[in-house]
Amino acid sequence: MIERRVKKLLLDMLRITPQALSHRAKRIKSAFGPMSTEEAVYVIAHREGVDLSRFLSIETIDRIRSLVPKELPKSSGSPIAARPKDKKHPKSAKLYPLVANHIISRTVSIGDESFPQVFVLENSIRNLIIQKLSKAHGRDWWTKANVKGVRDTVQRTIDKEKKYPHREKRGLHPVYYSNFADLKQIILNERKYFTDVIVDFQWFEVEMNRVYMARNLLAHSVVIGEDDASRIRVFYRDWARLLESAGYK
C-alpha cells in the first residue's frame, strides 16, 4: 500500500487527481519496469524532490533508488517531464585540474543530499536546545546550565574568531559557536529536559557519534561513502520523527 503521506504530498505538489497519479505510475512501470505501482509512485516522488527518508524505511528507499531511471526522454511524451536546468546552480559535474571526474560527480550527489541534511539536522538540534533550556533556566541559560566544558570550548572558538573582526559573526548567542559534538554533550548533560523527545539516550549518543564522524568528513572535504550517507539519512529521518511525535513542527 502506498504511504498515504507521500501520496498526499505528491497530489498537492503536482495538483493532480489520484487517477492522474495512477496513470503516471502506469507509464513509469511501462517504460522502466518491472516494479509495483507503489514503487512507481515512490519513483515519481523521488524525482519530484520529495524527501522519502521522512516516510519510508531505508530498505525501501534503497530499492527505489535502484529503480530510478538514470535518464528520461526529453520529449513531451515522457512519463515525467524533464526539469529545466538551473543556470545559476548547475547540477552536472565539471572537470577540474588534479581532481578525478568521478570524485567531482560524487560531490554533486553529496551536495544535493548529505550536506543539506547535516545542516538542517544540526540547526534543528540547536534550536531544540535553545527552546528547552531557555524554558528551564531562563534567558541566561548558557551560564546556568550544566555545560561548562562546552562553554570553555565555545569561548576558545569565539576568542579565536575575534582575531578576524571583518568576518561576519555566527550569531548573537554563544550556542551558535557550538559544533555537533557540543550539541550532543549539552543534551546528555541536561537530559532531564529532553525526555519528551529522546526516549533512549544511549541510542541518541551512538547515533550522534556516527553522524558526527560523517559530518567531519564533509567539513574537511573528504568524499563520504554510501555507508556514511546512509547513517546521515537515517538519523535525519529518525530525528524528525522524534520531534513530530513530541509535537514539534
Image (cartoon, grey):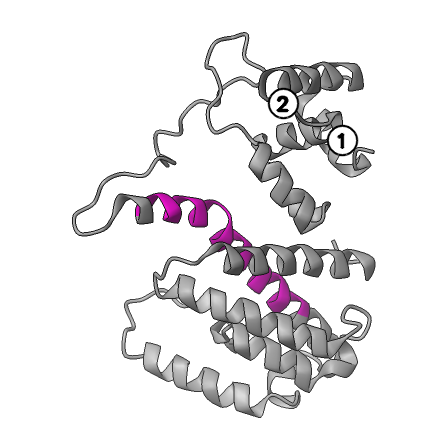
Q: What residue is pinned by disc 2?
A: 33
Residue 177: x, y in percent?
47, 74
Q: Secondary structure at mark 2?
A: loop
Q: Residue at x 56, y 70 (%)?
A: 210
Residue 225 visible? The answer is yes
Q: Main secondary structure of the magenta part?
A: helix
Q: Is residue 91 above or below residue 128?
A: above
Relative to 194, say whether 11 is above or below. above
Nearer to me, 36 or 104? 36
Q: Which mark is residue 7?
A: 1
Horizontal and vertical percent position of residue 241? 75, 56
Residue 219 in the image: state x and y as whole percent: 39, 64
Which of pointers 1 and 2 indicates the residue nearer the eye? 2
Of the numbered discs 1 and 2, the one sitting upstream in the chain is: 1
What's the residue at 43%, 69% (across, down)? Answer: 216
Query: In the rendered image, is residue 50 in sight?
Result: no
Q: What range of the chain is rendered magenta?
A: 104-128
Q: Is residue 106 magenta?
A: yes
Q: Amino acid at mark 1?
A: Lys
* Vertical side of 64 occupied by 202: above or below: below
Residue drawn at x 67%, y 54% is 237
Crowd tier of the residue under label 2, counting other residues whose Cα lies within 10 Å: few below 14, some 14–19, many 20 or above: some
Furthest-left residue in view? Answer: 97
Where 107 falls versus 128 (above or below)?
A: above
| Element marked by disc 1 | helix
Look at label 2 and name its amino acid: Gly
Query: Residue at point 34% right, 61% down?
Result: 221
Disc sitting over residue 242 in the figure: none
Quarter holding residue 122: bottom right
